[in-house]
Image (cartoon, rainbow, N blue to C red):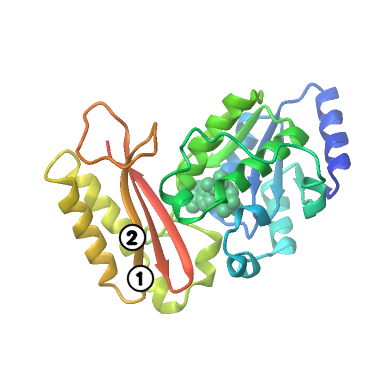
Amino acid sequence: MDLVYKRNDCMNLVDFIRSRNETIGFVPTMGALHDGHLSLLNYSLQQTDYTIISIFVNRTQFNDPSDFKNYPREIDADVLKLKEVGCHGVFIPEHHEIYNGTGRKSYDLGNLDKTMEGKQRPGHFQGVAMVVDRLFDIVKPDKAYFGEKDFQQLQIIKYIVKNLNHQVDIIQCPIIREHDGLAMSSRNQLLSQKQRENAPIIYKCLQHVKEYANKGSLSEIKKVVVDEINQTTELQVEYFEIVDEETMQDTKKWEKGKNMRACIAVKAGNIRLIDNVRIS
Ligand code: AMP
């Protein structure tokens, strides 16, 4: 497995792969790898010749300094996992390798950042856009893999890729869950035992919403979900919205023919958990 830390070394590696006429698959991550990340990697291994994963805890997308400080970092364990699954290349840059004073400072996000994560975490998606743009400039992948777990992020990345004319196919990958339904996340390991025991209620509620799709009033269903989660010890809903996948705007009534997705953020103490399901 090739391990590179410097932007120039990564660009040289990419040039070398290209000189062999191989296609490149890319999986950007913040590390503390779990089976959700590895599923993205497996799609890339199947669909491209050479898979590169990046591990970079991107300071610019954290609006909360304590969240950045506490974010799990496990580089040695990550590298071992990546070797085991047959990843080809790993790019682990320092902050200055990505943010070296050049490049765009602000991005048109097509108003997709005005709701949910964007509203709760000011500046978050500008930070995401900046790092993804810069990583794409360095890695120049044919395909890049992103999880539906961060659904709003996925839609924003599709938008900027089109807008900035990056020649990359964005591959949307399904959410991988724990056996009890909790969406896998690097942050899950920060949960207390009690919080971890209670967290699967989030996915259970999302499944109920799916059963009720196109029936009953949306506002009633939303209230039932929010009340049920808020009554659970140590869980507090930050937002729960049923959005049109195209616009990321909250919908007030069921709309036939539109792809709608129920998206939720829940605080368990200081830990934010997000999840979503397609409901129609
Ligand atoms: P992160 O390291 O949290 O920035 O995530 C890196 C990539 O892995 C993003 O595209 C995420 O959407 C994706 N991802 C994170 N958790 C999961 C999961 N449980 N299932 C599928 N993809 C995931």
Residue at coordinates 23% horizontally, 65% vertically from top-left? 228
Residue 1 in view here = no
Q: Is residue 218 left or right of residue 174?
A: left
Q: Tell me, yes or no, whether the two marked residues, 1 and 2, touch with CB atoms within 8 Å.
A: yes
Which badge, 1 or 2, comes first in the chain's sequence? 2
In the rendered image, which quarter is residue 274 located in? bottom left
Residue holding disc 2: 202
Q: Position of residue 134 (x, y in %)?
A: 72, 39
Q: Which of the image's four quarters has the C terminus?
A: top left
In the rendered image, which quarter is residue 237 located in? bottom left
- 230 over 265 or under it: above or below: below
The amino acid on which the numbered mark 2 sits, given as a three-letter code, is: Ile
Q: Secondary structure at mark 1?
A: strand
The amino acid on which the numbered mark 1 sits, given as a three-letter code, is: Leu
Q: Is residue 232 left or right of residue 44?
A: left
Residue holding disc 1: 235
Residue 6 in view here = yes
Q: Residues within 10 Å of mark 1 (few under 14, many from 20)?
A: many
Q: Position of residue 43 (x, y in %)?
A: 57, 37
Q: Secondary structure at mark 2?
A: helix
Residue at coordinates 53% horizontally, 71% vertically from top-left? 190
